[in-house]
Amino acid sequence: MALYALGDLHLSFQVDKSMEAFGDLWHHYVQKIDKYCSRLTADDTLVLAGDHSWGHNLAQCETDLHFIASLPGRKILLRGNHDMFWDAKKTDKLNDLFQGRLYFLQNNFYTYNDYALVGTKGYCYEGKDTIEHFLKIREREVERLRVSFEAARNAGYSKYIMFLHYPPTSIGEFSSPFTEMAEEYGAEHVVYAHCHGRARFGDSYLGEVNGIEYHLVSGDYLGFKPERILR
Ligand SMILES: [Fe+2]
Ligand SMILES: [Fe+2]
């Protein structure tokens, strides 16, 4: 029994957008996901840290989500910036639709032994929007993260693993509202994805910082092999 994490599967069984074109790190990526994730067992938990599918709506993601659901263990999904099928306000609907097969993490939490698994998409500045827009989106994500932490705390949990899709800090930042919240609640691990390509793997924290272990789990960083976070 173990807790694993992997992000950015970027599946595209129903749309014409394979990641195979994006260089050697993506070579045979679907086969690698299948191979490595199939090694998990029924009592393992796999948190998928966003960017699951290239489909533009739920109908176009059906095969991708079915593929994920067919992997062994309990699958908990986080929203990525490319997950167009998932309106944050309709998370309950997704949880009803995939009841017992997939678990969607948004404004709620899940558990692993005595840990609460909390998270949200997060946000960082990538030079693609105005500072005002960046701050607005980040603030909304910070609020959503707090809802997740508070739900867990109110249920009696005091040990946390925090998941984000975006890296917890923008390039050049040493801290952010996300790292501050991780420290405020005493999260033991912060797990994030989204960073693609060798030039981006060092964009945010890796390893221990202020007593918190930071993990990048984007698929191409890990060679599509889920990282074990807890035994
Ligand atoms: Fe991605
Ligand atoms: Fe992403």
Image: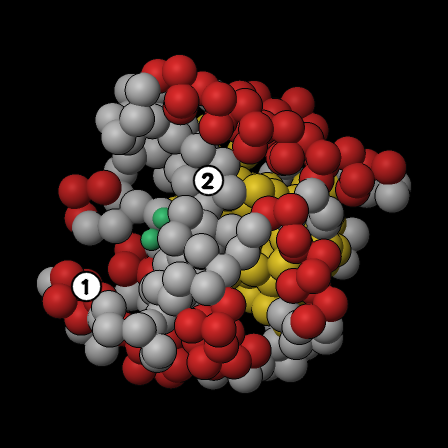
Q: CA distance from mark 2 to mark 1?
A: 22 Å
Quarter of the image where one finds residue 128: top left
Quarter of the image that includes the C terminus: bottom right
Q: Residue at x 29, y 65 (%)?
A: 223
Residue 218 is situated, as x and y percent measured from the top left of the image, at: 36, 54
Residue 65 is situated, as x and y percent measured from the top left of the image, at: 50, 74
Q: Residue at x 49, y 36 (%)?
A: 122
Quarter of the image where one finds residue 144: top right
Residue tagged 1? 25
Q: Secondary structure at mark 2?
A: strand
Q: Residue at x 22, y 77 (%)?
A: 28
Q: Residue at x 39, y 66 (%)?
A: 55
Does 43 sit left or right of 50 as displayed?
Answer: right
Q: Residues within 10 Å of mark 1 (few under 14, many from 20)?
A: some
The mark found on residue 214 in the picture is 2
Does 11 sit left or right of 120 as displayed?
Answer: left
Q: Secondary structure at mark 1?
A: helix
